Structure formats: structure tokens, C-alpha cells
Amino acid sequence: MLSARTALPALLAGAALLLATAGCHSKSAPTPENFTTALNAHFLDHPDCLLPDAPRFPLETSDPTQLKQMNALVAAQLLTVEEERDIHVSRFTTTPAGARHAPRFCYGHRVVSSIDSFTPPAAANGFIESKVTYHYTMEDVPIWADSAGIRAAFPAFAHATTGTASDTTTMASVPTGWQVPD
């Protein structure tokens, strides 16, 4: 049986060991699990979109790349088009179905499937940061977006929905764990 004199140091040593090992599994540790959790939470509130810069509709354009993209949205029945032959532009307007998705036409959110690598955490921009490289899949992709025409007009969408897409983002350590700085 331990005396009070020997029990107290043993108890303190045990508590210190418990705290030290608990720190290894804290939300602020730079681990693949913590990065995955933080990234997935971020992506639930930040969907990927075909038009991240949110144009205003009706949209008039004569730019060939933009025409290709808008015409793909016409084929998906999200936009209508009128040609203004006198001024050589096409005017795109949202359909009732398109109005629910305009102006950015978001097509789902990322779900991290693996953390491939991360840099050692270091001080930058007033935070402890790490650059994290990950693979992801897309969830909640709407039917209107899942077409060859949309994939051809929007290469970023085509890449994101391959099932093998990857990206890199900077993560910042905050008191509650890791997060993507806004």
C-alpha cells in the first residue's frame, strides 16, 4: 500500500502522462484526421460552383469561352438565349429552374478522401499554418450538371467530378483546431 507521501507524486506523474498523451489526439495536432475533419466541415458551407465570380443576369457576351459555357447552361435548361445581331452579342437570361441555381450555379461540395501530404506547421499571417494536399470526391452533384456538355464547357467541373481530383489548401491552427482561412 502506498503512503500519502509516495502516492501524491505517483498520482501527479500519472496525470502528467495522461495530459501528454491526450495532447497527441487533440484537435489542434497536425494530423491527417484533423485536417480531413476541418476540410470536410469547410466544404459543407463552401460548395464548388461553375461560375464562382457570380455574373449578373441577364448577361450579354460575345466572348467565345463564355458563349460556350452559357450555351451549355442553355442546353441544361437553366438559361435562355437571345441573339442581338445588331451589336453581335448573345443575351442570356435565367429560366425558372435556373433562377434557383443562379448566378453561381453551384454543383455540390467536396468530401476529402485522403490527405496526401502537409507541410510542417509554421508561423505565417499571424497564425500557425500548414499547406495540405488532398484528394476528394464530389457529393450532391445535381442532375442538370452531370452531362457531357457541362463537362466540356467547364473543365474545372470535369476535373472535380472525376473521383480522383486533388487540390492543395492552406490550413490555419486556431484554438478550436484547424480551419481554412476565409
Image (cartoon, rainbow, N blue to C red):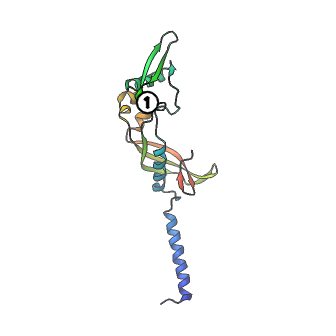
| Residue 85 on image: x %, y % | 48, 10
Q: Residue tagged by mark 1?
A: 154
Q: Residue furthest front?
A: 96
Res 105 → quadrant? top left
Identify the residue at image location x=50%, y=25%: 57
Q: Residue furthest right?
A: 126
| Residue 54 on image: x %, y % | 52, 31
Identify whether 150 is placed above or below 81.
below
- SS type, badge 1: loop
| Residue 91 on image: x %, y % | 48, 18
Q: Residues within 10 Å of mark 1 (few under 14, many from 20)?
A: some
Identify the residue at image location x=46%, y=38%: 48
Identify whether 172 is placed above or below 94.
below
Identify whether 117 is placed above or below 29.
above
Identify the residue at image location x=50%, y=64%: 24
Res 69 → quadrant? top left
**Number of numbered callouts drawn:** 1
Residue flagged by tag 1: what amino acid is it?
Phe
Tell which of 20 and 145 is nearer to you: 145
Image quadrant where one finds the C terminus:
top right
Tell which of 58 and 51 is nearer to you: 58
Identify the residue at image location x=47%, y=30%: 102
Res 176 → quadrant? bottom right
Tell which of 42 and 163 is nearer to you: 42
